Structure formats: structure tokens, C-alpha cells
Image (tube, rainbow, N blue to C red):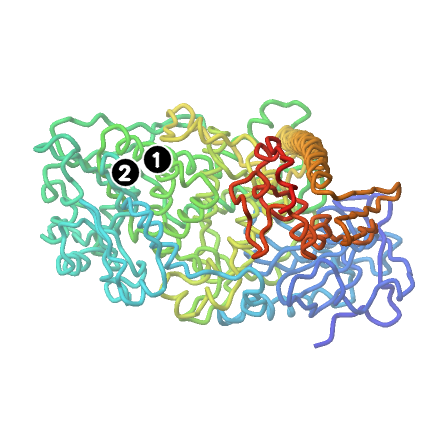
Amino acid sequence: MTALRPLPGRSRSLRYSSEKMEGTGSWDVLEWTKLDSASWSSSYSNLDCLLEAEKILFEACGVILINTNEAGTLLLSNFRILFLSEGTRKLVPLGTIPFTAIEKFNKLALKVQSNKYHNNENAPNRLLQVTGKDMRIVVYGFRPGTKQRRAVVDALLRSNKPERVWDLYAFTCGPSKFSNTNPKERLLNEYFRLLGKSSQRASMNMIEDGSFTLSNDLWRITNLNSNYEICQSYPFALMVPKSISDEDLIQASTFRARCRLPVISWCHPGSGAVIARSSQPLVGLMMNMRSNFDEKLVASFCTQLAGHKEERRKLYIVDARSKKNALANGAKGGGSESSSNYLQSDVCTWPKLVCSSIFCLLELLVFTDNVSLQIIFLGIDNIHAMRDSFSRLRDYLDMHGTTSSDGTSSFLRHGGWTWGGGNLSSMSASVSLLGDSGWLSHIQSILAGVACIAARVAMESASVLVHCSDGWDRTTQLISLACLLLDPYYRTFSGFQALVEKDWLAFGHQFSDRVGMPNVSESCNFEVPIQSSSARSFPSSPVQQLSGSAIAQSSSSSYGLNNYSPIFLQWLDCVSQLMRMYPSAFEFSPTFLVDFMDCLLSCRFGNFFCNSEKERQQCGISETCGCLWAYLADLRSSSGTFHVHCNPFYDPSIHDALLLPAAAALAPTLWPQFHLRWACPVEPNAAEIEDQFRAMTAMYSEMKKEKEEAERKVDELSSAVESLREELLTERDISHAARESAKRATKECAVISRAVQSLGCKVKFTKNGDCTVEVEDGPQKCSHSILQNPSDTTDVSESISSVTEQNVCEALCPLRTREGTCRRPDAGCAQIGSQFLGLKTNFEAFENLSIREGYFAAE
């Protein structure tokens, strides 16, 4: 497939003029100049910015990034849109966006007044507006008459609309070095931790033979859904009360929407309280439908309080919807629990106080103390309201940001009315637009409901059952945030991964529908976005307000637009609000959340594909796609605890238990690292103090390492000195022993010399060390010389022994009889010996030796 090229004879690059366009145009006039065609390479295979298995499919030169008035080249790969700057040929982050992160794109035609750079007076500037799911609105400008925009849109439609999930880039790239372990094992390990069985480790053999059904005194793991026959959107393993049999669970599942029966998501290790989840009960319009099995299952969460044999704990049923919406669902067969059927309960609402401020608080009505079960309605809006609110927030940021999609500063747009040159009424109007988006109000509603759940569990040791309609959107938000408040483990990197995989992935949050990805079971087409009445009342983005005529030529949006909703993004926003309130309680930083969300939206990894665990297993996601968690861990491994993903202020000793924010602390603000990074790119740099602290911490760590290294060298030198000291002491002892041995040898030599002379032998020593022994007795004479050769290692004792071996002494001994025996076997001479003779020596006997003249008398 050939890349898009400029028409022959046209220039391949452009430069924008310094002159401003007169009239109503809001962005600079582009001056087209001829440049050498060799300045742009036709091959992009060697680009450093390309990922593994990423290939360039299309090219459009001479494109303007309207947001920043920057010229460059637009590339389409099999993964994303890339925008390369003309001057540096480096990737421009704002203009680079993965296909799956695009919510919609529109062709716009904006007519401008004539000028000297256009031959045609009515030549339109061809624009392509790309709206991202990550808060950005990007506009690309194309030269008129080149038909580049049409070709780019056609190519983008083909590349951005895979009919199957297997056509996504993650399957083309493969697992690579970021291989994925089986998520089922990780889910079981988290269950084991919650049950107090951390010593047990899950394995594939355990999963295959079903031996993972462990239990404690109250709760157990069941393999009832191992084949996803009970509930297709639930995981293969479920935590349920130990007192409820599998047969009761099967019966209870039929009374809940989509068979999402009440199961345990988290249990308190000390008090035994649990947080359970489910979908809405099928009570019907008249709320007269009942299920004894469901009522029994719900009642089983009211276990006995620790230390109180007869007192049972309270149970709260938290319905994320408003009571009005819950009753409306009854017309479709759903609804909410009846206070007359589930134990003895009171129904309480969670109303919003009417307040002119956008930071209105939520208050809970006072409960009575003589009931064992209470129902709370939180009044959180559904996915459609969240989608509209997110769109309004994005438009607000694009309109009032520093850099907007029309290339004009918000301070100068419309004559400066945005801030009115200090006009308070104009400023208040801008602030009211932020409030009208409703995003911060939704965030506050969720945080207030989460604080309510955590307080009931922590302060009353009560169990809580949470549900909404289907139990996979608002329910998941509430439960996972409550776990963050209650369990410090989930505030670490490993715990955060376990939390997301347990409550979001395993329990069937529909990521394919909510994020806008192709699903397994259906071929998805792009649809033109349908604006609601509330959306139409909100001012449009700056591009749609450009002077002249702005015509939407074509539009394309994400898969299943009616089901698309930023539910998970909203949850991460809530997490960032908690991190702002408790800056030292989380091991990870807000930057980690941003990169995590970017990876999810890009669909570069397969962890969040499909709508359920069952579908991911059918697609073989864990075997065929890379792992997002492994990728993020690999990034952190390069810098350790000083990586930008790590919170430099993290101190687990400060917040090692419950986090319970007060109502006044729940006033949310915009998430700068995510919301403002495109509209106000300078504002997220407000975290410079954090960066400086991280740099100082890194410097301190390096100095600490150097100190430890110096101390180690000192220890080594001290050990070496001590070793030398011990060696010197050893040498001294050896020298002393040698001196003592020399003295003893001298003494032995003198004694032996006297003994030899007493036997009539003469020993002569020369200056060169030679020794001669002469023995004279009448006619017998024997002479033996001992030569001292430096190279000769023969022992002196052996030389003298050789004299002895000639029987010289034996022949001359006066005590020797003719038969060869000794006349005086007990005499001292019989005990003479020496180290030179090779005999044992008794020197005391030798000293006392007295030679009598009678010994030498003739026989």
C-alpha cells in the first residue's frame, strides 16, 4: 500500500508566515516554500520512535498542527497517528495519538479571507479534528487542492476500525519481553491473602484439578463457576459464606440481574466484616418478587460479632443509584431490595443538598440503632451522564486552556471576554461552565459514598452489600475505592494491581464497551455521535466556534458509542483525589496513574481487552499479548524507587491502616497531570517540588551509597590491618620458637660432641661447613666426611646415621660383648639418642652420663 505523497510539482514542506492573517482568521497564514525533496526520507523504518512491530502505512507531508501552528509530517502506522516536527523531525506528543485512544474525528472546512499566499480567493483550509479519550482535541491542517485530507481520513477509517479484537496491534506485537502470567493464579493468591492463607500459592495444577477451594471459619472459595455456567461475567472462583451450599448459590443467582449473585469482594482480617457485591434483585415493578435463597445468602453476611456470641453484625445494602432510578428499573424487572423481606431494615436515602456552589456536599440521614439491616441510596448517575459530563469537561478545558485546538490563546479569544481583562462577571461565567460540566460533582458523589462504606466497615464492624443495576460500573468504583481506604496493601504497586485485576477485570467490568474497543462476539462499526440535549446546551469547543463556516463533513466515533463511558478513568480520578488528601499513603505517584491510563487507552497490551474473564480466556489474551503490568514494572526497574512512578513521600508507617476522609475534605479539584496536560501543559509542572524532592532523595541515596562504600573500604582496611597484625604475631611466635629450637640444637650439638669425643671419635668442622668424623682404635680407623652442599637437602642426622650404620661405634663400644650384646643394658648410653641420629633422646639421662675408666679396661 503506497504512502500518501504530495502532488508532483508541489512543495513537500511548509513554513508558516510571521504575518498574522487579517480579518476573522484565528491562526497564522501558512507560507508554502519549496524545499529539497531529499530533506524528507521516504523510509521511516529506522525511526527511533517506532515500537516493536510498528510499521508506517501512510504518509502526508506538509501538515500543520493547528493547536501549536507547527509544521510537520503526518504518519499513520498500524498502531497510531504520528506527527513529526519539520525542524527537528522529532515526535510531537500532542499530535501523536493511538487509534484506539481516538473517540471521534471530523472533517472540517473553514473558509478564510483571501491573501497573497492563495491564488483562489475562496480556497478553504482543510482541517481534520481528532477528539481523544484522554482529554485532548487535536486539529490538523492540510493544503487546499492536494486531497491529502481525504486520503488520510480514508486510511484512518481503515486503520482505526478493526472488525475483530484480533486485528489490534497488541496481537501483532505479541507478548515480546513483557510476557503475562496467568491472571487466574493472581486472583487466587489475592483470595488466599484475604482468607489468611498467604502461605498457599496458586498454580495451574491447582486450577485444573479444582483444589483451590480453601476456607477459613467464615468464608470459602467455591469452584461453582469454574466453567462460567452460573455467571458468564463473574470470575471462575468466588468467595462466598461458608454456611451457604453450592446448591443455594445456584438458586440465588437466578434472582439477580445477569445472574450476578451476592459474593464477597473483601473481608476484614480482624473483625470479620465483608464488602460484598452483586447486581440488582429482580423484584419487579410492584417489588413483590422474592427469593428465599437470595434472602438467605444476604443474611449470611450478618455473622456474629467477634467476642459477642449472641450479637450479630449489622448489614448495609448500598444501592449506587437514586431511589427514583431504582424504582424505575422495576419496570424492566429490576429494582432494589424490599425492607420488609430482608431481615428487619429501614430504607435510607443519600440526598444531595441544594447548594449554589459546585462543591456541594452529600449528607447521610441519621440511622436508628435498633435495626440489623439498612438500605442506602447514593444517587450516583449512570454511564450516559458520565459520558456527557466528560465531554463537557473536555470542551471546557479546550476552550479555556492555554493552548486550544484552534491555535488561539484563551486570553485573546473573542476579544478577551473569557477573562474580561479582570471582569469578575466574565470570570464567574467561565467558572460556572466548569460546574455545569458536572464532572467534579460526580467525583464528589462517588467519594462521599465510598467514605460511607468504609466508615460502616471500620467503625461499626458492619458488612456492606453494594450494587447498582448490573453491578459492573458504579459498584466496581465504590468497592475498589473502599478497599483502598480500608486496606493499605492496595496502596502499593503489587496491591494496586491485585485490586484492579480482582474488582475490575475478574468481576466483568465491560472494558471493550466502556473504553471503545472491538468486542469478541460482534463486529463493531463506527457511529456518528449523538449529542444529548444537555450536551447541546454546553458551549462547543473552540474549533467549532471559528469564524467563517465550520462544516462537519464526516464523523467517526468509538465502538458502541451508546456503551462508551469513562468509568475507569473516573475511578482513577477519584484515586488521584485520595492521593492529594493523603500524599504519603500511596507508593505510586499521579504520573503512574496517567501512564497507566494511557497504556489502557492505547490497547498496546491485552490485559484490558474484552468484557469479561471468560472472553479473555477464549481469546488467549494472556498467552498472545504483552502484559501492561510487566511493562510498567520494567520502566520502574530502570530507576528503582526514584522513578517518576514512585511516590517520593510514601511512608507506610504513617498510614498503615484506615483512611477515612471527613466530608469537608472531599471537595475535589481537577487532576492536573491528566486533565491539564494538553490544555494547560505548564500547569502539571506544578509538581516541580516533587521532582526536586525526588532529585534530592536520589542525591542523598547516592551519597549514602558512597558513605556505605567508604565504610566498607574502611572495614576492609581494618580487617587487613588486623590480619597483618595476626600474621606478625604468628611470625613473632615462629621466630621465638626458632630461637628456642636453635638454642636447643646448640645444646644438643655440644652434648653430642662430648659424647662422641668420649667414645674416642674426633669431629672436625671446616669453615665451609664440611664435617669429618674420625674414629681410631688400634689398627682400626674410620673416617667419614659430611659435605655441606647448599643444593643438598640431606639431613645431618642421616649422615651421622650412615657412620652408625658402618658399625663403627658398635665395634669400639667397650660394653659390647663378642656375641654383640650389651653388658650394661640399663646404662645411660643405651638411652642416648638425638634428632641427628634419628633416635629418641633422653637429655637428662645424657647429662647425668658418667663414663667410668673400668669400662675401657681390657678383658
Residue that carries the numbered disc 2 in the rendered image: 268
Label 2: which secondary element: loop
In the image, 447: left or right of 309? right
CA–CA distance in space, label 2 to label 1: 8 Å
528 is higher (above) or lower (below) than 763:
below
Residue that carries the numbered disc 1 in the rendered image: 486
How many marks the image carries: the answer is 2
Residue 251 percent across, percent down from the top left: 14, 59
> Residue 660 or 2: which is nearer the viewer?
660
Marks 2/1 in contact by CB < 8 Å: the verdict is yes
Dividing the image into 4 quarters, which one contains the N terminus?
Answer: bottom right
Q: Amino acid at mark 1?
A: Leu
Residue 204 percent across, percent down from the top left: 36, 64
Quarter where residue 4 is shown: bottom right
Packing grade of label 1 (10 A; few <14, some 14-19, many >=20) is many
In the image, 674: left or right of 379? right
Q: Amino acid at mark 2?
A: His
Residue 686 in sight in this render: no
